[in-house]
Amino acid sequence: MVKIENSKRTILNLAESLLQDKGFNGFSYAHIASELGVKNAAIHYHYPTKEALGCAVVKRYRDRFQLWINNSRVKDLSPNEKLDWFFNIYTDMRADKGKVCLVGSMEAEFNSIPEELQGEVAALHKELLDWLQTMLAEGRDAGVFNFNGEPANKAALIHSSLQGGLQMARALGTKKFRDVVEQIKLDLLV
Amino acid sequence: MVKIENSKRTILNLAESLLQDKGFNGFSYAHIASELGVKNAAIHYHYPTKEALGCAVVKRYRDRFQLWINNSRVKDLSPNEKLDWFFNIYTDMRADKGKVCLVGSMEAEFNSIPEELQGEVAALHKELLDWLQTMLAEGRDAGVFNFNGEPANKAALIHSSLQGGLQMARALGTKKFRDVVEQIKLDLLV
DNA sequence: TTGACAACTTACTGACTAGTAAGTAAAATC
DNA sequence: GATTTTACTTACTAGTCAGTAAGTTGTCAA
């Protein structure tokens, strides 16, 4: 037994990466195991089912996001800076070998993933939209953002376009994603 | 042999539906065969590989789209009517048991689908954006649309948000998709 | 009426899937 | 120093996957 430092976290990292790369139906325990140099059963020891593994990935992502937005390094930013911080999450995914957001990856195959995982994805998506909505309302009140209609609807539009934009970039190139971000800003900033 | 009228088209219809419902990695020949009441090998007779089947679905979609946009019933519409026609394609998908656009479904698992299929998806996406871009430029010239920046970028934003919006609706409900469409219009119409 | 062909079925293959049960060795705990 | 626990491995199962080869049957053209 070669003791690997924190296998559980290493597995989660790899699973997250594979989810964003190939989708839930596009990776297997064997992929993870071979990449880590262990046997399939070792993965099952830590995460008994694929459903449990998927849920753990999304749960960790949700926790991480809540930590970020409640940390003063994000909390105390101006609306403009918050917007850039949020965009950068997605820009970094694109830069990291064309990854796609967890939410988009799993919603695209929503009807072929386990039920509990569907619930986790929905919860994460809701939390992302809630934060975006609040941030947009703040910015409009502060006079740095300009848009008509409900902040919730504008939040839904912006997140959808980032989600779709990352996917588009896979087929049509990174520039297309940058174009989307640029246009969001053109439509939002005063 | 019970002769089924135009099996090839029936298979294609079912494959398209499954692609939009479960994703490329989420359906199998067995799903199609059992639904049609035939054996797996019957599907392979018409489409020897899954790659060929996927490509045929996308190719047909591309042809259909070109027929539509070159038909006078769409060609002669005003920019406003063209916009609504395009939105309705996506609204109808959402209404049809939460389907998602072909492009989005396959770009989300882009790195785990066959190479030739990737090419077909890219071609389709490009054609959709080209038409959108031209339509937006026409509308702005005619004074019925209002947006800053390049029509190509606005087209990329709008398509991405429809693509992401359909996916979001699976987790968060149809209303969320309607919100996105409403917001696109608010941001575009004068 | 015969022969060709289209549209299948039967029967199979080898690879891969998630998941399990039992065994093992090192490390932590008592 | 003995016992328990952690983190695996070995060896397996039952099911599914795409794909193939060979045989069958109804239809149609010559």
Image: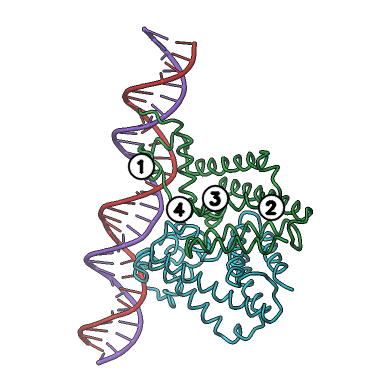
Chain colours: A green, B cyan, C red, D purple
In the image, are marks 3 and 1 on the same chain?
Answer: yes
Identity, as a three-letter code, of the amino acid under mark 3: Leu
Which circle's residue, 3 or 1, is located before the other in the chain? 1
- SS class of the residue under badge 1? helix
Which residue has dot 3 on it? A102
- A113 and B111: which one is in front? B111
The 10 Å Cα crowd at callout 2, few under 14, some 14 to 19, many 20 or more, is: some
CB contact under 8 Å: marks 3 and 2: no
Q: Inspect the image, locate mark 4, and give the three-letter code of the amino acid beneath it.
A: Lys
- Mark 2 falls on what kind of element? helix
Pointer 4 and pointer 2 on the same chain: yes
Q: Which residue was labeled with disc 4?
A: A97
Question: Marks 3 and 1, how far apart in space?
Answer: 23 Å
The disc numbered 2 marks a residue on which chain? A
Above or below for A52 versus B132: above
Labels 2, 1: front one: 2
Co-location on one chain, circles 2 and 1: yes
Q: Secondary structure at mark 3?
A: helix
State whether discs 3 and 2 lie on one chain.
yes
Q: Residues within 10 Å of mark 4 (few under 14, many from 20)?
A: few
Question: Which chain's residue wears label 4?
Answer: A
Task: Give the image location of residue A87, x and y in percent.
Answer: 60, 53
